[in-house]
Image (cartoon, rainbow, N blue to C red):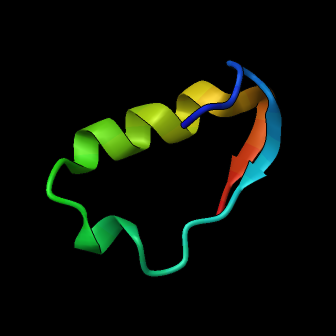
Amino acid sequence: LPISDGWADVVISNGVVNLCLDKSAVFQEMYRVLKPSGRLQ
């Protein structure tokens, strides 16, 4: 994602991860852009 580390308060994934081949990379990227107190939904 073209977003800085720790930028997002919330990352919402609605029916996307199950369609991705490299789920590990998807979760790594989601957590990378989350703020330390951010939430994954």
**In the drawing, does residue 16 fall left or right of residue 2?**
left
> Where residue 22 sits: x, y (%)?
18, 47
Q: Residue at x 78, y 51 (%)?
A: 10
Q: Is residue 28 above or below residue 5?
A: below
Question: Residue 33 in the image: x percent, y percent?
Answer: 65, 31
Left or right: 8, with 33 as reference point: right
The residue most toward the bottom is: 15
Q: Is residue 24 above or below residue 41?
A: above
Q: For this view, does 18 lie left or right of residue 33? A: left
Q: How many marks?
A: 0
Quarter of the image where the N terminus is located: top right
- Furthest toward the top, the residue is 5
Res 30 quadrant in image? top right
Residue under the image location 80 percent in, 39 percent down = 8
- Residue at 41 percent across and 32 percent down: it is 28
Task: Identify whether 9 is placed above or below 21.
Answer: above
Q: Residue 20 lies in what quarter of the image?
A: bottom left
Residue closest to the far left: 21
Location of the C terminus by quadrant is bottom right
Residue lying at the far front of the rendered structure:
2
Q: Residue at x 29, y 37 (%)?
A: 25
Percent across and percent down for residue 27 are: 40, 43
Q: Nearer the viewer, residue 22 or 38?
A: 22
